């Protein structure tokens, strides 16, 4: 992990919480957060092994990076909180 990401802190959730989206069991809780350095953190399902072979040829993924999937609903409900720039 790059050093600059180690010091970042969660500043806010983007969109509705998993509970507001209907996850009452804690079994499916994708989430999005904005970090203090302007980056974004994602809680999702690790699909690296399945999707890595399908990446376009010009895509590069570092060993410490994972391909994480979130539901469409999670991203759409966060859209109004994602800055334009």
Image: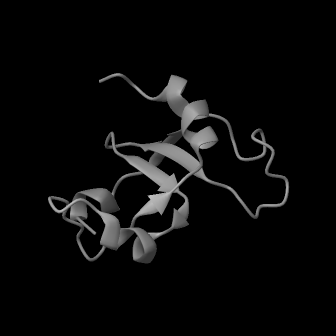
| Residue 14 shows in this picture | no
Q: Position of residue 26 (x, y in %)?
A: 77, 61
Image side of residue 31 versus residue 38, left or right: right
The vertical placement of 76 against 69, above or below, is above
> Looking at the image, how many numbered discs can be counted on the residues?
0
Is 72 positioned to the left or the right of 82 in the image?
Answer: right
Q: Quadrant of the N terminus?
A: bottom left
Viewer-proximal residue among 18 and 13: 18
One can see residue 81 in this view: yes
Q: Is residue 1 left or right of residue 79?
A: left
The coloring applied to the image is: one colour
- Tell me what residue is drawn at x 54 percent, y 57 percent: 43
Give the quarter of the image for residue 54.
Answer: bottom left
Residue at 75%, 64% in the rendered image? 27
Residue 7, image quadrant: bottom left
Specify whether 14 is left or right of 20: left
């Amino acid at each position: 992990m790059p050093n600059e990401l180690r010091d970042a802190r969660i500043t806010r959730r983007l969109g509705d919480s998993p509970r507001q989206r209907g996850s009452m069991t804690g079994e499916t809780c994708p989430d999005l957060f904005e970090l203090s350095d302007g980056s974004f953190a994602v809680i999702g399902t690790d699909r690296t092994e399945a999707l890595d072979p399908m990446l376009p040829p010009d895509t590069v993924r570092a060993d410490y990076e994972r391909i994480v999937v979130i539901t469409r609903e999670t991203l759409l409900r966060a859209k109004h909180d994602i800055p334009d720039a």
